[in-house]
Amino acid sequence: MWKTALKPRWIAGFIFAIALSGVFVLLSQWQFGRSTQPEAPVNPATEQVQPLTSTLQPGEFFHGSVSDQMVTAQGTYSPDKQVLVPGRLHDGKTGYWVVSAFAVNAAPTLTGAAASPQTWIPVARGWVADPADAAAPPSGLVELTGRLIPSEAPVPGKAPKAGEASAVSVAELINYWGVSSYPGFVSATAEVVGGKDASATAVPGSLLPLNIGPQPPSQQINWLNLFYSIEWVVFAGFALFIWWRLVKDDYHRDLEEAFDEAEAADAPEQHQNQQQQNEQQQPDQHQQKVQP
């Protein structure tokens, strides 16, 4: 069968089948990519800086529509309300997030026995490799700008060390600091004090900026596109199967033609042998008739 497959026309057919299968595989990859694309692109409105006090209210549920929103607020840091969150990566290195409590000016105050006179919000100010590098936050009136992020969940079964928190969890931090808080935290991008930016983004040092961008929307599987991607793979295999089937049919035709040619070549010899047998049988039959 290999002799048949090596005919020029079937070599050309094999090249065509391979090329066609490659196109089908590319179409399959394209359909698979479309099956896992996000339903909606990143919302550009989150990059427009909005006042924190009008974007999110303390004591309310953190709405997904305000997640990743760039916000700004004026207030002050408390140097004695700062924790480190271990196990955070930065450029492949493990270190700590420096999280400080920020008292928001003009923020609504909560009521209740455990409510504090001011409303605070945790601010992730940067990353350090060594806890000793975590300097105190800037003092004085600060104009904070950063990305608003939902509160993380505390890590269960893990007791943080003194001065540390298991996560940037509002529920954990308000108990640690004893303050009322917004239901989220801010990843700082600017901390302007007296007209100068004192954040990790602007001031080189051991405190490195977090550079947290907007999170992409969750991906959903489009089952129709996924089915099409599988279908194109089947087509790719079918193209090769058709080539193999055509070669096999041609091989069988070659066998039949060779068999017919062999029969045609043997036919005269068989006819001659049959004629000789008939001539030998005729005298014998004549002798049998003339015997008394």
Image (spheres, helix red, strand yellow):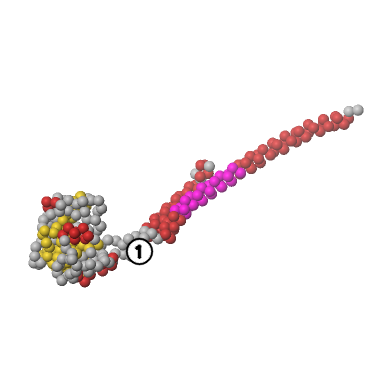
Q: Residue 199's spot in the image, x, y percent?
A: 13, 61
Judging depth in this view, the residue of 155 and 272 nearest the camera is 155
In this rendering, would 140 be left or right of 236?
left
| Position above or below: 63 against 260 | below
Q: Is residue 246 magenta?
A: yes
Per the picture, the main secondary structure of the magenta-coloured stretch is: helix
Q: Which residues are magenta?
A: 232-256
The structure residue drawn at horizontal position 14% and vertical position 67%, both measured from the top left corner, is: 117
Say which of 122 and 196 sits in front: 122
On the rendered structure, is 7 left or right of 162? right
Residue lying furthest right: 292
Is residue 56 shown left or right of residue 245?
left
Residue at 13% across, 59% down:
81
Residue type for callout 1: Glu
Residue beneath the point at 54% across and 46% down: 248
Q: Secondary structure at mark 1?
A: loop
Q: Nearer the viewer, residue 257 or 138?
A: 138
Q: Quadrant of residue 207?
A: bottom left
Could you tell me how many numbered marks the image carries? 1
For the residue pair 152 and 19, the one nearer the viewer reads as: 152
Residue that lies at the very extreme toward the front in this rendered image:
113
State yes or no: residue 260 in magenta: no
Q: Position of residue 211 (x, y in %)?
A: 20, 59
Label 1 environment density (alpha carbons within 10 Å; few <14, some 14–19, many ≥20): some
Which quadrant would the C terminus be assigned to in this image?
A: top right
Can you identify the residue that label 1 sits on? 39
Q: Name the residue at 24% across, 56% down.
A: 154
Residue 16 at least partly seen: no
Residue 27 x/y as whole percent = 41, 57
Question: Is residue 55 in view?
Answer: yes
